[in-house]
Structures are given as C-alpha cells and as structure tokens.
Image (tube, helix red, strand yellow):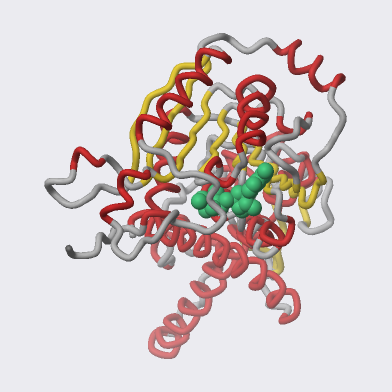
Amino acid sequence: MDPVTFSPPLYKQRYQFVIDLVKKYKPKKVVDLGCADCTLLWKLKFQTCIEVLAGVDINRAVITDKMYRLSPLPCEYLQPSERPLTIKLYQGSVAEKDPCTLGFDLASCIELIEHLETPVLEKFSEMVFGYMTPAIVIISTPNAEFNRLLPGLNGFRHKDHKFEWTKEEFQNWAQDVCSSYNYTVEFTGVGKGPPGTEDVGFCTQCGVFTRSYQSEGSLTADSCRDTEHSYKPIYNVVYPNLCDGTILRNTVISEVIYWAESIRKNMVECAQEDETVDNHSYQASSKSVPSVSNISQETCSTEEHVLTDTRGDNEAYKEGNTIFIPLAKLFSFSKVQKLCSSLDHLKAILSETSQVELNSDATAMILSAVEDIEEHAEACWDTSCLELGVALAECEEDWDEELCDS
Ligand SMILES: C[S@@+](CC[C@H](N)C(=O)[O-])C[C@H]1O[C@@H](n2cnc3c(N)ncnc32)[C@H](O)[C@@H]1O
Ligand SMILES: [Mg+2]
C-alpha cells in the first residue's frame, strides 16, 4: 500500500479549517486551548474580525518558545489598524476554570483532547461547555479508524496520546457533551484517504459545536466573582490602533509629512527642470525665467497623486524660498481624509504639533524650498518608513496567503 500523504500537510489543513470557520462566524474574541507554539494564533491574528485573541497551554516552555512572533510588526506601528487587537497568552490547564477564559465567542481545541486522561477530559468538558460557554467550539482529534492507512504505525500516533477514538466513540462523547451542556454538534474532518477508503473517514475528525442558547452577560460576571485565578499570564500585547488618540495624531502627521514632501520634491524638481529649459531658451532668445509658482504640477509630476491636483485655491505655491501647501490640498488625499473626520480636525491636529509648520492663519503648511540636508534626510526616512510599512503589510498578506494555500 502506498503511504498516505497530505497536501497541504495535515496540520496546516487543521489550522485552515479553524480559519475558515472564523471567516464564516466572524467572532471578535477567540481562544485557542492547547495553543502550543502559537502557530494557529499567529495565523488568526490576520483575521480582521478578531479583537481579542488568547492562547492557553499547560506547557510554559512550548508557549514562550516562539511567542514573540505575536508582537506587532514594524509596519503595524507605522500603519496602525482601525481595529483594536489584544493578544494574551496563559499557562494553565484546560481542566481548571479561570475567569480569563470567559467571554470568548469561539474556542478552538486542536489535537488536544486525546492528550487528556479521562478525569481531566471530564473537567475539560465542564470547563469549556459549562463555564466558558463560547458560542462555537471546534474540537479535532485523530480518527483511530484511519490508522490502518498509516503504514508502520504501531499503537497510537503519538506517545502522549491517552486514547484515539473511532468515529462512533468521538460522536458518542460529543453527543453526551451536547445533551449535558445544551449545545448541538456537526461532524466533519480534514485529511481524506485515497479513493476507495471513504468509509474510513477523515484522518482528523472534527466536531463543530454550537451553543443552543443566548449567553447572559450576568452569568459571566457572577462566574468572574466566584472563580479564583489559576492561570498564569505569560504575555499580553495591545496592538497599536487608531482608536488611540496619540496614535491617530502621529499617523495623521506622518501621512501629511509624506504628501507634503512629495509635493515639495515635485515642485523643486519641476523648478529645476524649468530653469534648465529656460536657461537654454534665455541664451537663445534673451527671455526672463518664469516664477516657480506658475509651474503646473500636472506637467511635471510623475506621481499620480500629485498629478490629480486641480488648479485653484487648493494649489501648492511658492513665495521666495517658501512652499505653501494649503491644508485643503493635504485633506484631499484619501488616506488623510479617512483618518481625519474633517478639515477642521486636520487643522487642529497640525496646529498642536511642532513637527509641521503652518502659516499665520493655519490654512497652509509651510516648507522650505531650499533643501536642508539633515531635515530632508529625516523626512525621507519618514517617507521610506511609510513605504516600507506598506510593502511589509502587502508582503505579509502574500506570505500568509501562501502559507494558507500551501
Ligand atoms: C498535540 S499538541 C497540539 C498543539 C496545537 N493545538 C496544534 O494543533 O498544533 C497538544 C497541546 O496540548 C497541550 N496540553 C496538554 N494537556 C493540557 C492541559 N491539561 N491543558 C492545557 N494544555 C494542555 C500540550 O502542552 C500541547 O501543547
Ligand atoms: Mg495529538
């Protein structure tokens, strides 16, 4: 018999199974019980519906090994998200109740239950379905019937397994849990066997449990009061997000500096180009050089966002060595508009910071047309950070999709 292989690997199919259910139910609060090295949590953090993500495992060392990959990426500081996200990790046993496990919409328990002794499994059922009561619980465990398709397997699939159940055994246990705790369950799985082995079922069997009643907030509050903390917090990270006023202000300022620098660069380059052309024609025809304020951005710019400027009050202009960029012009960039609810809001933010200079009636941003090398280097750094942020975010999405597809 040819060895059975899975593509993508079975563990990735299990993670994808959870991700698909998260996409379907859009839970805000998700906990992974038996989270091990946080791989599933790391994938789940990219699901934008999730605002609180928690992981619990009895083994502290396995959690801490790679937990820092759950830290925000540089681009997540540079381009903070609109959604709040907090990630928390705890060392604790799924047999113990702890108030920090309350209030979750979805709990995943991937390849966990077969590692629990019978008395622990009973406590696990009570703790998850009777105490935590998430709206959705996903449980996966090996299907013992599939083992005959795994050549060379002598006994259980892992030395720490306390049992491996047939489909009937798993389904009986799940139905008992449902009648005790008022849930319903649907069975499915991941990892198909070769053609002709359909009766064996999936390599990993899964149960998706749905709570049959509406949750009552007061129950959660009572449970919180009545239960002692038994879990040890290991990690708690709050992602930067635009609900935080300081982060919003800094993001607006960075965005404004980015566009202002693009406009300045464009105007200076246009002026230089024009001077070159004019110097030639001056020599030929003895005409005077036109002022930079007459230069059309449309004719000079290679960047679409600058090209789209409409002539009029919103136009950036130059007086001597000073460039004036009307705030209305800066507000016309869609990202700035999205961040600031109104032009007045933008004005208020820019008036309060020393990072940008405004004219006397605070209607325009002022920049020097003469390049100060240090200042310019700083601004370029800001600009490239923003660009890097966008690139990293895109790269990260591709990377995640690739992982999910593989
Ligand atoms: C086979 S691993 C599965 C890890 C992860 N869910 C996955 O699918 O990659 C089982 C995990 O359950 C954890 N575990 C075992 N007994 C536990 C208990 N009583 N409470 C919490 N976690 C437990 C183990 O430390 C281990 O990390
Ligand atoms: Mg296992």
Q: Residue at x 53, y 40 (%)?
A: 48
Q: Is residue 99 visible?
A: yes
Horizontal side, residue 122 vs residue 44: left or right? right
Residue 287 locus on image (x, y percent)? 46, 79
Name of the residue lying farthest toward the left: 196
The residue lying toward the viewer, choosing from 23 and 124, is: 124
Nearer the observer, 326 or 39: 39
Q: Quadrant of the C terminus?
A: bottom left
Q: Quadrant of residue 351?
A: top right
Quarter of the figure with residue 59: bottom right
Q: Is residue 79 visible?
A: no
Residue occupying image coordinates x 71% and y 44%: 248
Look at 76% across and 10% down and name the residue there. 218
Does residue 94 lie above or below 62 as drawn?
above
In percent of width and height, residue 44 lies at 53, 46
47 vs 123, nearest the viewer: 123
* Side of 147 relative to 278 (left or right): left
Residue 349, horizontal then vertical, whole percent: 76, 43
- 215 w.r.t. 46: above or below: above
